[in-house]
Image: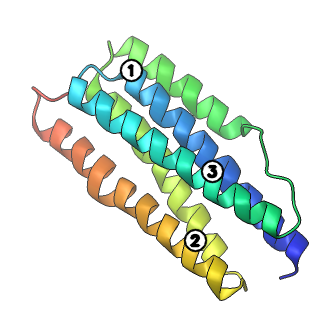
Amino acid sequence: MNNTEIATLLNGLVEISRDRADNFKTCANNASDPALKLFFVDRSQSCEEAVKALSVEVIHYGGNPDTSRSTEEGLLRILTNLKTVFTKKNNLAVLEECEMGEAAAVMAYENALRQEIPDSLRALLERLYEGVKRNHEHVVRQLRDEARNNPNLA
């Protein structure tokens, strides 16, 4: 890949990370459990840190960091808000919506890591990918399953 292609690839991850941060903020606003709210705020901050790290790399490869929000993710936030309004800020509904966004992020990082990129960039993307996978598999999905199995958490 040339530098322009790399910057474009990275900008896609910037956009996804920004959308994830926004989605976690939405989930924090819609969760009824205080611990869950704190978890979502923490995850949002982690995504914002990824945006900063990826933006530095975009600049390094000669691009301008993307500052827009994706239409798809904007729709996901609207659906998350609507679903939680109709379910009275049901934690399970919030976790299910959050899990969908994280699944999309996992796929985006997997696609990026299949590309021919410099080793130093690959190391950064692998580190960020591990965090996304951890969010998706071990935290969001696990919390969602716990809420499904325990009516007091939902």
Judged by depth in the image, the label closer to the viewer, 3 or 1, is 3
Q: CA separation, marks 3 and 1?
A: 23 Å
Give me the C-alpha separation between circle 2 and circle 3: 12 Å
Instruction: Please give the name of the residue rendered at 28% of the width and 51% of the height, measured from the top-left corner.
Output: 139
94 lies left or right of 6: left
Q: Nearer the viewer, residue 77 or 64?
A: 64
The percent position of residue 6, horizontal first and vertical second, equals 80, 72
Residue 14: in sight, yes or no?
yes
Callout 2 secondary element = helix
Q: Residues within 10 Å of mark 3 (few under 14, many from 20)?
A: many
Residue at (9% x, 26% y) in the render: 152
* First-in-chain label (2 vs 3): 3
Which residue lies under the disc numbered 2?
A: 125
The amino acid type, in three-letter code, at marker 2 is Leu
**Residue 45 on image: x %, y %:** 47, 41
Residue 116: quadrant of the picture: bottom right
Q: Which quarter shows the N terminus?
A: bottom right
Dot 2 crowding, Cα within 10 Å, few <14, some 14–19, many 20+: many
N-term mark: 3 or 1 = 1
The residue identified by callout 1 is 30
